[in-house]
Image (tube, grey):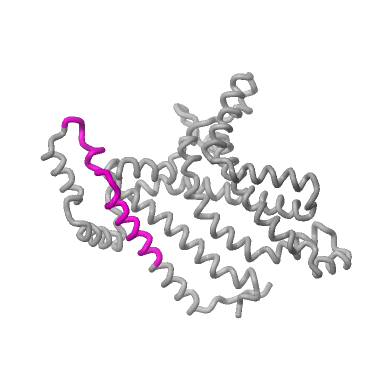
Amino acid sequence: MRYHRVPFRRITGALARMLVLYWCVLSLTFVLLRLAPGDPSTFLLPPGATRAQAAQLRTSMGLDRPIATQYARWLGTTLRGDLGTSFVERRPVAAVLGDALPVSLALGAASLALSFIIGIGVGLLQAARRGTRLDLSLTGLSVLLVASPAYWLGLGAIACFTYLASTLGMPMWMRLPAVGMTTPGIELAGMAHLADLARHSILPVSLLAAIGAAGVARYARAGAVDLVDSDWMRTARAKGLGEVAALRRHLLANLRAPLVTLFALALPGTVAGSVFIETIFGWPGMGRLMVTAIVARDYPVVLGSAAAYAAIVILANLAAELLLPWADPRLRT
């Protein structure tokens, strides 16, 4: 396909809209945090602390000032690239996010890639075999995976592949670890460390990929069923093109635009939606960090996490908007 150049005016217009939306999301998050019940000082003070100590702590954190003053101060520091200091960990928020964000991005990227590879393949297979027992079985399985809560699937996977496998005396390579990214108490390096990390990644990545692939398969099947018997598909078959080649070359090309949109919507959802998986499996990613920060009323970390999530969502949608004319030539005008 010929390269399509995106007009510069379209890029600048999209960036302007995204910046305004980004500011609105962060400002709304700031206001909702301040209006929510609870006080960070109550989680940080030791038992038996006096009111004077509580007031001193609130002053040191800048919580005794009016909301407008707090917002102006936060906005000024954020524009300078300073996300503040964590109330709980007493570390810069950028450092806290720097430890957690790569974990969620790696987990999300691996599961998202598998979700689309498996989901598109299953969706096209269902469209080609629509109405058969295989199609009905895969439809039922995909609906079950999409409808089941992630925490329920996670606990079920741990019960089957960790505790039950250990109880039945299965070989060690079949007993998948349930908690953590690596084996605790063991210092590994090189390929041994990567192998241990990969073994701990099997359950969380597989669960996220299975849930995502079920949704992608339903989406791909719905789009492919409408196109699989179209005139141009019948023409391709009449010219001697095999079914698999026709699906790959022609039908998948026409599904490219909706799949690009779906990918843009699924990317932030995969990173943000790993809250339950990271909590259940003990992965120190953004989902687990966000839950801990909300419970502890760690305002700087919550705002920093919201900024990271909003940036991922906005950039994913911006990329999809710029890629749609490439995916669908009809949109170039």
Q: In the rendering, at what x and y percent does residue 27 appear?
A: 32, 60
Residue 301 is left or right of residue 217, and the answer is left
Q: Residue at x 43, y 48 (%)?
A: 101
Is residue 269 shown above or below 6? Answer: above
Image quadrant in which you'd find residue 331 = bottom right
Taken as a whole, is the magenta stretch helix, strand or loop? Answer: helix
Residue 181 visible (yes or no) = yes
Q: In the rendering, at what x and y percent does residue 29 appear?
A: 34, 56
Q: Residue at x 16, y 30 (%)?
A: 48
Q: Which of 249 and 212 lies nearest the eye of the viewer? A: 212
Residue 193 is left or right of residue 307, and the answer is right
Q: In the rendering, at what x and y percent does residue 94 appear?
A: 34, 51
Tell me the quarter of the image containing the C terminus: bottom right
Q: Residue at x 43, y 46 (%)?
A: 286
Q: Which of 109 and 185 lies nearest the eye of the viewer? A: 109
Tell me the quarter of the image containing the N terminus: bottom right
Q: Which of 185 and 92 lies nearest the eye of the viewer? A: 92
Q: Residue at x 49, y 32 (%)?
A: 179
Residue 169 is left or right of residue 235, and the answer is left
Q: Over which residues does the magenta segment extend?
A: 21-48
Residue 58 is left or right of residue 163, and the answer is left
Q: Which of 250 and 126 lies nearest the eye of the viewer? A: 126
Q: In the rendering, at what x and y percent does residue 98 appear?
A: 39, 49
Is residue 63 shown above or below 253? Answer: above
- Is residue 195 inside the magenta stretch? no
- Is residue 36 inside the magenta stretch? yes
Q: How many marks?
A: 0
